[in-house]
Image (spheres, coloured by chain):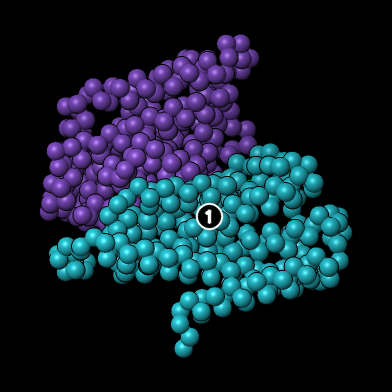
Chain colours: A purple, B cyan
């Protein structure tokens, strides 16, 4: 157990170091997310009487679109120069590879979400009426939900033909529960929650995370094998 | 023992016979539904399609586990067949649902949890099939299809609950929850009819994949190493 933990931390550290050394890639993902947010504001119109009502939806759509780029990138760098072969040769539990990679992706998406959230609030003239910690929790649970199954599918599609189409095709229908719950929870955090629905949406997110973060590590070894 | 293709066609014969009996009972013998009239008779094919779509995708889930554990090409063939038949049934389900929804609810589409879940189920498994077609190596294709099937199948109940909660904030449609006893028999017969037809299609598809594999094996010389692939430790 401690072995698995320390191995996962080492894989995570490798990924974070890689992300840090190629900051340009992370920045382009951020730029992409900002661009989509701008596009959403054009789509919703300049004289929308209540632009803040959609803030949760736009935030999570921007994160979802950006996640396909971030996830795809995290394995594209591995397929270059035979990185994947070396990952296979590492004397570590495949589950540790999953946890390291998926945590790295979740952290990247979480930071991305934290960066675009203020912009989102400003662009759509919304203010957080609920609690900030709950909003942070929503962001963490939601990005973990995108990163968990996303890591498995990105590992597959990076090695498949037509990788750019395959990842969204597989991931988008799968993460609909995450999207529904995260958008609802964010909207309730930003606006008001008169009927106290927030706990049920957060528990739905937690259940999704629990299911996929326990199922995916078991399957990940078979994704990587030659 | 009869040869396998003849045994397989037996499923089709039983399925078609049952479908004829069930449809006759549903369309002629059974009384028209009290509120929907004759339109309600689509029930006799719609509900069995729904049951079988879920059942066939559950078969796919078990074939996926079998294929992942045993690494036998036969299990992968069956998995491929089950996914394709599952997609076919889900697509039929959505089309029948729209045809039924128009005269009864006045719309082709509503965000009812069952409708939405079926639609998501359909696109999810189309994705799995897409993934399958983008991988060339047979062993890798088999394990990736199995993994994607397991993940997608696990998601069905979560999608259902999330959509149900999402919907309850709006008004909910009433759907016929109970079915009168005179209508149950044709429903059951058609359910078995579609089950036999689905089994027939799955087995035929698996047979086709097996033949394609032998053909491919004959054309390209198999490298010696691949016959000595070691099992999972």
Identify whether A200 is placed above or below B183: above
- The percent position of residue B174, horizontal first and vertical second, equals 75, 50
Viewport quadrant of the C terminus of chain B: bottom left
The mark total stands at 1
Horizontal placement of B37 versus A187: left or right?
right
What is the quadrant of residue A193 in the picture? top right
State the residue at coordinates (76%, 44%).
B102
State the residue at coordinates (79%, 71%).
B25
- The percent position of residue A54, horizontal first and vertical second, equals 56, 24
Q: Can residue A219 be seen in this view?
A: no
What is the quadrant of residue B166 in the picture? top right
Q: Is residue A164 visible?
A: yes
Q: Which of A127 and A57 is in front in this view?
A: A57
Horizontal placement of B225 versus B44: left or right?
left
Q: What element carries label 1?
A: helix
Check the image and name the residue furthest to the front.
B219
Q: Nearer the viewer, residue B218 or B200?
A: B218
- The percent position of residue A155, horizontal first and vertical second, equals 29, 45
Within 10 angstroms of label 1, few (less than 14), some, or many (20 or more) residues?
many
The residue wearing badge 1 is B87
Which chain hosts label 1?
B
Check the image and name the residue furthest to the top.
A47
């Amino acid at each position: 157990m401690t072995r698995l933990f320390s191995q996962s931390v080492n894989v995570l550290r490798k990924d974070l170091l890689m992300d840090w050394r190629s900051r340009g890639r992370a920045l382009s993902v951020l730029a992409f997310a900002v661009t989509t947010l701008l596009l959403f504001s054009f789509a919703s119109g300049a004289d929308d009487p209540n632009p803040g009502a959609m803030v949760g939806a736009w935030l999570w759509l921007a994160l979802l679109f950006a996640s396909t780029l971030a996830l795809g990138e995290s394995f594209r760098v591995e397929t270059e120069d035979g990185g994947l072969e070396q990952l296979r040769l590492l004397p570590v539990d495949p589950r540790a590879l999953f946890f390291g990679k998926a945590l790295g992706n979740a952290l990247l998406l979480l930071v991305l979400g934290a960066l675009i959230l203020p912009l989102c609030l400003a662009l759509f003239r919304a203010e957080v009426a609920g609690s900030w910690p709950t909003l942070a929790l929503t962001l963490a649970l939601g990005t973990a939900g995108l990163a968990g199954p996303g890591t498995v599918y990105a590992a597959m599609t990076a090695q498949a033909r037509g990788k750019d189409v395959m990842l969204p095709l597989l991931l988008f229908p799968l993460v609909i529960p995450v999207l529904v719950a995260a958008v609802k929870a964010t909207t309730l955090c930003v606006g008001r929650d008169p009927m106290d629905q927030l706990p049920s949406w957060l528990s739905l997110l937690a259940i999704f995370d629990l299911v996929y973060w326990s199922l995916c590590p078991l399957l990940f070894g078979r994704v990587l094998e030659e | 023992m009869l040869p396998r293709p003849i045994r397989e066609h037996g499923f089709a014969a039983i399925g078609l016979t049952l479908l004829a009996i069930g449809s006759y009972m549903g369309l002629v013998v059974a009384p028209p539904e009290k509120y929907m009239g004759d339109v309600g008779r689509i029930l006799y094919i719609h509900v069995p399609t729904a049951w079988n779509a879920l059942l066939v995708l559950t078969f796919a889930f078990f074939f996926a586990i079998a294929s992942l554990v045993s690494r036998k090409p036969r299990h992968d063939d069956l998995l491929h067949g089950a996914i394709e038949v599952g997609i076919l049934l889900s697509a039929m389900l959505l089309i029948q649902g729209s045809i039924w929804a128009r005269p009864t609810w006045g719309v082709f589409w509503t965000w009812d949890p069952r409708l939405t879940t079926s639609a998501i189920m359909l696109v999810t498994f189309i994705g799995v099939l897409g993934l399958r077609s983008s991988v060339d190596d047979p062993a890798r294709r088999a394990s990736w299809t199995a993994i994607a099937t397991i993940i997608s199948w696990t998601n069905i109940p979560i999608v259902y609950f999330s959509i149900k909660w999402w919907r309850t904030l709006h008004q909910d449609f009433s759907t016929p929850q109970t079915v009168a006893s005179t209508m149950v028999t044709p429903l059951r017969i058609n359910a078995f009819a579609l089950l036999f037809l689905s089994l027939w299609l799955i087995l035929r598809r698996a047979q086709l994949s097996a033949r394609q594999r032998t053909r491919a094996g004959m054309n390209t010389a198999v490298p010696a190493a691949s016959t000595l692939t070691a099992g999972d430790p």
